[in-house]
Amino acid sequence: MANVPNGDYTIVATSLGYDKVIKSVSVSGSNIVVDFVMQENAESLEAVIVTGVTNPKAKIESSVSVTTLRTETIAQSAPRTTAEIFRTIPGIRSESSGGEGNSNISVRGVPISSGGSKYVQLQEDGLPVLLYGDMSFATADIFTRFDANVARIEAIRGGSASTQTSNAPGGIINIISKTGKSEGGVIGTTFGANYDSFRTDFAYGTEIADDLYIHAGGFYRVGEGIRDAGFTANNGGQFKLSLMKEFEKGSVRVYGKYLNDRAIAYLPAPIQVSGTNANPTWEDAPNFDATTGSLHTPNLTQTLRLGPDGEPSRGDVTDGMHPVSTSLGIAANFDLGNGYKVSNNGRFSANSGAFVSPFPSQVGTGALIADSFGAGSTLQFTDGSPVGANSLVARIHMFDVELENFNNFMNDIKLSKSYNNLDITLGYFKSIQNVSMNWSWNSYLQEVRGENARLINAFDSTGSPLSENGLYAYGTPFWGNLARNYDTQYNVSAPYLNIALEASENLNFDASIRFDNGKVDGTFSGGVESAIDINNDGVISAPEQAVYSVDNAAPTNVNYDYDYFSYSLGINYKLQDRQAVFARYSRGASAKADRILFSGLDYQNSDRINALDFLNQAEVGYKQGFDNGAIYVTGFYSSTTEQAGFEATNPDLIIDNDYKSFGVEVEGSYRMKDFSVRGAVTYTNATLESGDNDGNAPRRQPDFIYNLILSYNFGIEKQNSIGLSFIGQTKAYAQDTNELIMPGFVIVNGFVNVGITKNLNANLSANNIFDTLGITESEEGSIVEGQTNYLRARALPGRSVSLGLQYRF
């Protein structure tokens, strides 16, 4: 500014999506330079969103339900895994009891009928991590990690997700990376105070030349983890690199990721339930703490199997979920002039790894398990001591899965034309997803004990051994045996069109349509039984008399197509500058990948393949911004039609259901000087609309899910902070039969941050402070009332406390 008279002035700086900055200056004749550092306010109504829209748009002008999580907000909920972060998003139900991956994620009562995140897509920087979110043992969160590279997370529920990507009609969770435009870095170390974990994070970004920005960072973590595994169960890390060049009318960004991380996979475990189905008492099974125990044991860390090539090989139980992912992407956008803009985002990812974890196919007394091997059979520990008739024994099916090839290519290109009040966008999405994996499952017996469980051998009535070192079958005869090999490829092309009309200063409409066409080819193979000296000791032992392995001689060919249209219509009306209402109706679908195989269909007849599950949705919302906060209220309705997909932990179950749900979600935030509060609550009324359970509530679906985060800053420079978060849900039925109740729970987390110096910060973080038992799923849907039952369920981990030291520069 020039020619400013002498005096005292107040300068106010504002920018869309950033906190307002106010500075006082005194002018006395000389030139003055005033520097402004503006902090992004991702939670404001003016914040720009890029997820689920064809062009970046402020929240106040968008007709979608979207939540933005800043890294500071994420830290306040003291998450231990990426899936735990998602629990603070309204409408999202994230069953985060599986560890660093293998979580079940749903939205607004849309069902979790198999596993993973079938209707909700996880993205990194605007592209899917995997094309299908519910692939067995290869869920998207296994290949995703949260670290200091993340700038923010955007989550859209319903709305235009149907037409902005494939296989995500329920919503999109987009993890957006830093680019280096905001200069600075961080290095920090976190370690467990009451559990074994040590993690170092680092990141740095800066401008290295005119309009050329770099950002690099990652983490490395090692330790046993929160539960008692008896070995180093988490070991690995991630590195990401971004290089962006800005031009006068656009930008080009090249980015990459290398992930190689071993993380323990927690599957259902023994738990004791008594009382009635309507009013059960859930508690620890004898010798097994539900919040800290694990069926992992140092006595079973290796498995011997017959691989898909017919050769013996070993599986490493300590691998757990072991994703190995190398990604390289490029994103570019340019203003071509005359109202035209073009953008392209493409990425290739080489994905492979393993999933190895013990699953309890049965929990029973020693007498019950012994009888399953024939009259007069007995059980002994591997040291020869007898197993008591009333001792609890677990029949273990070792989920030993080689993730051989899950490579994918994703590319989204779009051309936009802007007129005075009309924007038209034409786009084309292309994806190729490989699905190649091998299941080589063995069966074991072990005692029910939360740590250092001993293996158990079985003997027939004559005293002849039926097992070796706990292994009684190369296969899973208790389930009718499972040995599988998948080798398929999914080629998807999806053109789409979006039209946005600004009818007036306050009223805008948008409509979009998408056509997905998928071509599937490849093979899959089941198993065959044979006698093989698999351990090469020259003797065919009892387990080796019936080795179940992949039958490479009889593969089933796969060659089918599928296609479908999706559409979405939205309207947004600004009542005032910071007040608006919106409405939207959408229809979309999610295609099945491996879940449709092994279902007895004709896989070369496209007309006979039930590859698609459809989702219709409607929503009406209100949003209001304040000087120090905002509130969002959205009513929603959804109708889901599902056909023929299997569940890995119950391969005889074929899911074929229709669902309906309606409800309301409320999200709000408020800041008052040094105190801030943020929370959300979602009410869902969901029902099954077909089959034997018509009219029942879908399994594991509570009426209410909610979260509340409180924080307070204090100190001379407000360098210290303290906070609590409350994350919970009401009761839910264990299965669709609506018999056994899983009780509601509230998980309380807390944190304390202490600013030692301007840039050095110490942190104390506690997750599940009160060691609450929170059941997220149960294999059984009912109990025998009036007696003690031993079920298989997955519980949230217990209390964990960590300490950290972080330096910002």
Image (cartoon, helix red, strand yellow):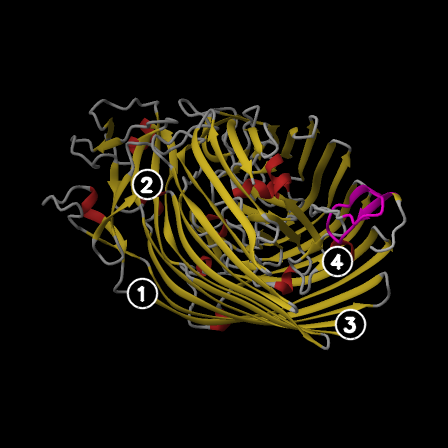
Label 1 packing within 10 angstroms: few (<14), some (14-19), many (20+): some
Q: Position of residue 633 (x, y in %)?
A: 77, 46
Q: Which label was assigned to residue 422?
A: 3
| Extent of the magenta region | 8-32
Q: Which residue is mark 4?
A: 62
Residue at horizontal 67 percent and vertical 40 percent from the top: 703
Looking at the rendered structure, the kind of residue marked 2 is: Val
Q: Is residue 29 magenta?
A: yes
- Against 60, residue 195 (above or below) is above
As rendered, which of 639 and 215 lies closer to the eye?
215
Residue placed furthest toward the bottom: 338
Looking at the rendered structure, the kind of residue marked 3 is: Leu
Query: Left or right: where does residue 350 sit relative to residue 155?
Result: left
Looking at the rendered structure, the kind of residue marked 1 is: Pro
Residue at horizontal 48 percent and vertical 38 percent from the top: 780
Image quadrant in which you'd find residue 521:
bottom left
Task: State the CA–CA distance, disc 4 to disc 2.
Answer: 47 Å
Task: State the CA–CA distance, disc 4 to disc 1.
Answer: 49 Å
Element under disc 3: strand
